[in-house]
Image (cartoon, rainbow, N blue to C red):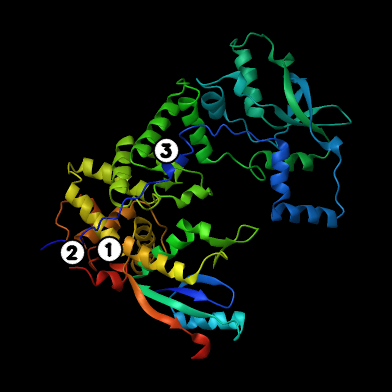
Amino acid sequence: MAFPFTYEEYNRKPNPMKTLNPLARSSGKTATYGDRVTQLENSNKWQKTVRAHQQAGRTFDISFIPKIAYVPLGDIIIDKDIQRQLEVEHCSNTIGGEKFDPRYLSTLICAKSPTTGVYISIDGQQSGSTVAALISAGLFDTNDWKTLEYPVQYVETDDLAFARRAFGIVNGKGKLRQSRFNELRSSVFCIRIDKNFDDNDDIVREGKVCIAEKYNCYPVEQKSSLTQHPGTFTYIIGFDNAKEEALEMLFSFHNRYFHLDGVHASMFPLFRDIYRDFKSAKLEFTETLAVELAGMIQHCFGDVEQFGKNAMQAQTKWSIQRYGYEHNWSDDQYAVVLFQLYKKMGGQEEVPMIYLDKYFDPKSNTGIVDFLGDELLDRAV
Amino acid sequence: MYFYIIKNSTDLGFGITGNYESRAQDYVSHAGPRSGAYFPYVFTGLAPHVRKLEKIVKEQWIDRTFITKDGWKTEWLKDNETLVKFQQDILDVIKERHLKVEVYAKDYDFLNR
């Protein structure tokens, strides 16, 4: 019996991302603080913030802006009740590891007591400790870390509550972290623009971006207007963690069958598992299987994203019936739902048995797939 | 599941709902009986396909929708959009994307039923 879903081709359109790709080249643009002020002043949110300050009668003293000093490392106190413990692994592997370069160090942040003149470290003890220990080990061109005048950014206060809050702000709360996309862009530009091949991680990441681009797929920033274009994706952590071979399969499948859409996040765990499990089972992910899966997704769900959402909803219903409570979604369930549905719809291509056993209750002969909804399951063989 | 186009005396918009009659009542409750609102088109189809249609309009046609100064993306279109153009584009995209969605009702005038 023929598989009931025949994939219907979409007319291919020119993808604007070929010219808009933010990783293809540097924008070459710069901005001044004047430009940024104008941008803020044109924003409703900023205007509201300014009005709120004005209505509350708040004004600010420029003398409170942090100051900069060079302070001997031996004179700085680390308040254990404010800072974290020393992270030996972080100092050994990350800060002081093989990629250590003094130029990557940042200033220490301290509260300086106006009464005693003592500097209390609020942030940066891991860096400061690493530098001191490297000097102590004779790896710097100076002998005494205690007298090393280290750059410190400080505010004068005896209020330790302020120091505690400041530590929270510097280390997360209130700080805008660099996005995953920005990290990726830095790696790619080190290779593509700076022609610097010192870091193997940068080389690997740029290589993965090349795989994506080969299939008209493009990583972009999460809230970017570029997400409206086909082939874009924002799930950078899934992309970073994927093996090159899995990415080849994923982007090739997307470009062949769903080239009018963005690349949905579910594709990353799905093809991670397809690559791994077909290889383990010594099975080939055949062209026939690929086109039948694409046809099934197209006919039953419209696209991969809707497949993913429906799979998650079905899992919730299934876990409530099976276990009596709503169990957390696990991303290996995408592949399980996809291949169980494929078999339920009469698919004849061979697939790893593990997909048919997992998340399936042999007693009741039901799995997640049986909760996809009657509207869809009525089409089953 | 339904995808509808809504038109009132000033604006053109869209939305999805599981119950278009109840959604029409919501519009009457919010905008009053003299808003001139009606559904020029109601489409129906497989729920994932209707959601896909809505996603195309909301994300791939984001430049056509009205966004407030605060960045809130509404389900209303910009002033230069016309009903004729919008409904034709919807029909075209259904065909182009092979969506299992079809016209269910035209000119559903819920204020004058």
Q: Which residue is mark 2?
A: A4
Between A230 and A352, the residue placed more toward the observer is A230
Same subunit under labels 1 and 2?
Answer: yes
Name above or below for residue A147 compared with residue A251: above
What secondary structure is found at the residue carrying circle 2?
loop
Callout 2: chain: A
Q: Contact, CB < 8 Å: mark 1 with mark 2?
A: yes
Image quadrant in which you'd find residue A126: top right
Query: Which residue lies at the image location 22% right of the left edge and 40% below the top edge?
Result: A279
Between A170 and A24, the residue placed more toward the observer is A24
Name above or below for residue A334 compared with residue A185: below
Which mark sits nearer the N-terminus, 3 or 2?
Answer: 2
Q: Which residue is mark 3?
A: A240
For the view shown, which residue lies furthest in the right direction?
A115
Name above or below for residue B22 compared with residue A356: below
Callout 1: chain: A
Q: Amino acid at mark 3?
A: Asp
Query: Which residue lies at the image location 51% right of the left edge and 90% below the top edge?
Result: B112
Q: Amino acid at mark 2?
A: Pro
Q: Which residue is mark 1?
A: A299
Residue neighbourhood size for the residue with mark 1, other residues' Cα within 10 Å, grouped as few (<14), some (14–19), many (≥20): many
Give coordinates of residue A35: x percent, y percent. 70, 40
Give coordinates of residue B67: x percent, y percent. 59, 60
Residue neighbourhood size for the residue with mark 3, other residues' Cα within 10 Å, grouped as few (<14), some (14–19), many (≥20): some
Q: From the viewer's perspective, is the residue at label 3 or at label 1 nearer?
A: 1
Give coordinates of residue A60: x percent, y percent. 85, 44
For the view shown, which residue lies furthest in the bottom direction?
B113
